[in-house]
Structure formats: structure tokens, C-alpha cells
Amino acid sequence: MPEFDAIIIGTGQAGPSLAHRLANAGMKTAIIERKLFGGTCVNTGCTPTKTLVASAYAAHMARRAAEFGVDLTGPVTVDMKRVKARKDSVVRPSNTGVERSLRKQANCTVYTGHGRFRSPGEVEVGGEVLRAGKIFINTGGRASTPPIEGLSDVPYLTNVSMMDVDFLPEHLVIVGGSYIGLEFGQMYRRFGAKVTIVEMAPRLIPREDEDISAAIAGILTKEGIDLRLNATCIRLSRHEKGVAVGVDCAEGPPEIIGTHLLMAVGRRPNTDDLGLDKAGVMTDDRGFIQVDDTLATNVAGIWALGDCNGKGAFTHTSYDDFEIVAENLLDGAHRKVSDRITAYALYTDPPLGRCGQTDAEIRKSGRKALTGRMAMEDVSRAFEKSETEGFMKIAVDAESRQILGAAILGLNGDEVVHCILDTMYAKAPYEMLSARAVHIHPTVSELIPSLLQGMKPL
């Protein structure tokens, strides 16, 4: 029975970095991967989808070329096989690079297979039982399939199987009007498909403020995407053209006929086949492993990192999980998950960059707050690039003067938001940006100080 100082199950964003750090610190380390090295981000998430978004953006801008005084001969066409080939060429080095670096790492042994707990200190993989005093779970998540009537009777795609698509669907129906659904919806519309997005809630991305949802809905509608909101009852059945999606909506026909169906209704953790019961590790009612503020589970010597713990479900939060665990174990640090500020992006075009609290969360807290807002059409850089959709808004605490949250929906919003996020981490008053920061012209970021100079009660 091989003995290790540490066992890591899964090679997502947190696992490989932790393996390198532990091994270099002199700990004999084993890392287990059952399928794709690099996890969701590298193989089916961030890297491939943003590569596809880039191809879709190129097609979109080519169609707009005349607006910029550029003449293109003939209609713009998209070769989906070449689009997929480009995506694959970007993904492949990342996937193979993760595996290669782990196999070359001294003091680290790579096991391929499905790791399952035999006891709190034992993990079985490929018929072999490994033992260690410290075990780290980094098994990620996968697309969830809710109990929708008829789902088992029709073919459908998920964010994973979409990675194998090398053709243009005639009519792509997407069930789910949140982050995954919106990104795929816009990119495939730009590739040339007819797209309908079906959402059970009254508006898109319900976790965002209503003005964000409305603005994104307007952007997508202008591009020819059909939105069916408040679809309180969804039914699926086979149709000679592909799939029939029955919806109970206040407006629109009761049935949508599509050639292909994408289910984009959320994700679930990969924890149901790990033998967690044999280790005594507790999960919540959705299957997420319960952890404390340092990512430790209820069982001594076992930690959970990344999407499987429900503490972020982003690549950047998974990497931060690695840093929290590694620094606490090896450097004597006292880092906590609760020190992390919520931040993420939605990669529609234009993108949404978000940090901190939403306006709704601030109002619910009862604290006094100020807010500033600016339309992207008032930003010189956006106007020069003819990309004026969206707006920026920031909220601050009226008493402490610290920034509470921001949303940048517009050109480079996913990058601009970081100057606000860094100010929040520094716990500096918003006047540090509004009165003292000198930003480069012409950029989107240069308007942040101006936005903050016109604050009003939220």
C-alpha cells in the first residue's frame, strides 16, 4: 500500500498548483486524474469558450466592416470546422502542458483513474490503495440536468458536448438564460444560427440587478436572438426537424421548434461517486462538500478546493483556494475564504465585469449607500470604437466611503473592473480614485474618477 504525505484528487485549477507546491516543499505527493488534465477551465470552460467567443467576435466585426470604412467583398461566412480546429489548437497545449508538468515534477506521482475513498486516510485508484495523512479534493463540477418533462426522450447538448460541435445548427434552442446560455447564445447567433433562449425566471441572469438584466436582454435582442422569459413550464419532445420545446410564457407562441437543444441550467459538483461516506466527509443537500473558512472539511486531514466546495465555482476562486490552503499549511499564514471579494465576468460582447455586492444586496443590508452611473456612450474610447452598448455603475458606503460593489457592462468591462476591485482590497476610500488617481486617456478606466464624482443616494 503506497504511502504518501499528500493525495490530491483531481487536476483542475487548484490541484496541479498544489501538487507542485507540496512536492517542492518536500512532501511526497500523489495526484489522481480520471479523465482530462486541467479540469473544466482548460478543456470545456474558460479556454475553449473564450476562444469560440473570439471567433464569433471576428465574424461580427467583419459584418460591421462598412461602418468603419472597410469594404469586404461578398458575404461574411463562417467555417465551423475551422473554428473548432482553432479552438482545439488553443486547448491542446494547455491540457497536455498540465499533464506533462505533473509527470516531470520531482516527488510527485501521477495516477490515472477514478479515485474513491476507502477510509478517511485511504484512496483507491485503479485497484491500488494509496494512504496519506493529508488529502485534498479538487474534483470540480459538471452540467446539471433538471427534471424537465421529456428531457430523457430528446437529444441535447451541454457545455461539454458543445465542444465537439463542428457545424452550424440551423436553430439552436437554449434552455437557461444565465452565464453559460448567454455566452453560447450570442456566439452561435454571430456564427449564423437562429437562436432562441428560454428562461424560467422573469428576466435573464436573475442574480444580477434588474438594470443589468434589461441591458443585456436589449443587446441580445438587437442581434436577433429571441428571448422567451418567464417560461414557468417547459416540456420537450422529438420533432421531425429536431426538438419541440413547449413553454408557458405570457407572450409568444406556446411551442418552439429547434434543430438542436442546449441545456444550460447550472452545474453540480462531482462528489456523488467519491466514496465520501466512507471517509465521513459531509456534503450539503446539493452535493457540495462542506468546508470551513480555511477549506477544511469536517474530517481532520481532508480539504476540498474548487468547484466541488460551492465557494466560488470560478477558475480564479479555485486558484485562490490553492493559495489559501498552501500558505496556511506551509507558510504559517491565516488566510480565509471570507477575505475574498466576489468578482467575476460574463463574456458576452460587451462583457460584464462584476465585483462586490449588487445594488439589491446593498439595499437588503439596510446600509446607507451612494451610487454613480455612466452610460458607455459617454466614454470616448467606446465612442471611438463604435462599441457604446452598456453602462458603468459603482456603489459606496456613505459612512466608511469604501466601495461596496460595481458593475461594468461595456467595452473592456472585464478588465476595467479590476481597478475598482483592487481599491476594495486596499480598503481605501473611493476618493482615492475619484480625486487622486490619474488614468490614461483614451481608455474606459479614465472615466471611473468622473463617475465617482457624481455620487447620489442609492
Image (cartoon, rainbow, N blue to C red):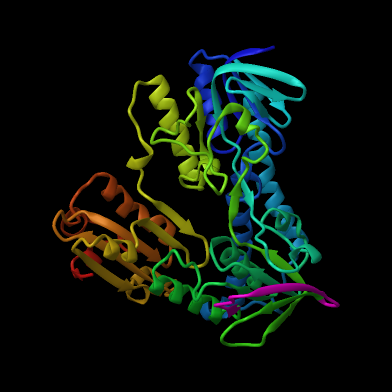
- In the depicted view, which residue is nearer to us: 157 or 350? 157
Q: Is residue 256 above or below residue 97?
A: below
Horizontal placement of 110 versus 306: left or right?
right
Residue 194 sits in which quadrant? bottom right
- Nearer to us in this view, 389 or 317: 317
Query: Residue 317 placed where, x, y %?
Result: 46, 43
Q: Quadrant of the C terminus?
A: bottom left
Residue 292 higher or lower than 56, as above or below: above
Q: Quadrant of the N terminus?
A: top right
Find out whether residue 131 is within the magenta segment: no
Residue at the spot x=62%, y=56% of the render? 49
Residue 380 image point, x, y percent: 34, 71
In the rendered image, residue 207, in percent from the top left (x then y), is placed at: 44, 63
Q: Which residues are magenta?
A: 226-241
In this picture, residue 360 sits left or right of residue 233? left
The residue lying toward the viewer, choosing from 91 and 177, is 177
Q: Report which quarter residue 100 is drawn in.
A: top right
Can I make out residue 447 in this image? no
Residue 249 rendering spot, x and y as whole percentages: 59, 82
Count of numbered circles in the view: 0
Work out which residue is located at the far left of the displayed protein and give it. 399
Can residue 392 be seen from the camera position used here?
yes
Against 400, residue 16 (above or below) is: above
